[in-house]
Amino acid sequence: MKKLLVLQHVPHELLGTLNPLLKRSGFRIRYVNFARHPDAQPSLDGYNGLVVLGGPMSVNDADRLPHLTTEMRLIEEALRRNIPVLGICLGAQLIAKTLGADVYPNKEKEIGWYDVSPTDEAESDPLLLGFQKTETIFQWHGETFDIPKSTRHLAFSSLSVRGESLHDLVTDN
């Protein structure tokens, strides 16, 4: 069975609608909740993928939230080991920052229910086969980022980038 490590920043931010898709794809999921265990040092050993979820903090607050630095080191390690990484909201910002992109205030805050749409690239992503239409998802964002060249932009709203992936999370291997 494939194993997936999920980094969580607050107890109420879960995989949501991705959970059944991942389970159907044969993933066993383990969460590391940094809100409850801020000093956790998770290992990627034995994992086939890494998902970094959202949260209310800023990726630029790593000086006062050291777990963000831990997460960026884990993202770097996943890249070195060719372990697929998917970032959602704050998770996408952490990937972008890890890869040297700027994360900066958005032109306006996005708080409430917003439409999130897949990009053309998402149509060929095996992880997102169940998300081929616009979904209305609760958002709480004040920042956005530049898309690093080595990533695939998978989803967006009218105001911000939502998710990016370094390569397919679900493979045939």
Image: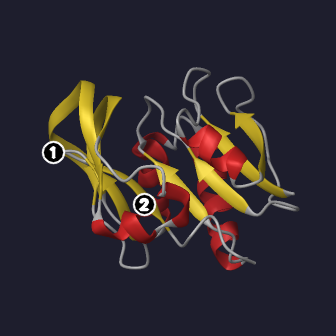
Callout 2, which amino acid? Answer: Glu
Residue 66 in view here = no
- Say which quadrant the N terminus sits in: bottom right
Residue under the image location 73 percent in, 37 percent down:
31
Kind of element beneath mark 2: strand
Q: Position of residue 32 (x, y in %)?
A: 74, 37
Q: Residue at x 49, y 48 (%)?
A: 91
User: Which residue type does callout 1 highlight?
Assistant: Ser
Q: Position of residue 74 (x, y in %)?
A: 68, 59
100 with respect to 32 (left or right): left
Residue 38 shows in the view: yes
Circle number at residue 164: 2
Determine whether 79 is above or below 141 in the image: below
The answer to whether mark 1 and mark 2 are in CB contact below 8 A is no
Which residue is most to the left?
Answer: 107
Q: In this rendered view, identify the residue nearer to me: 14 or 123.
A: 123
Numbered label attached to residue 158: 1
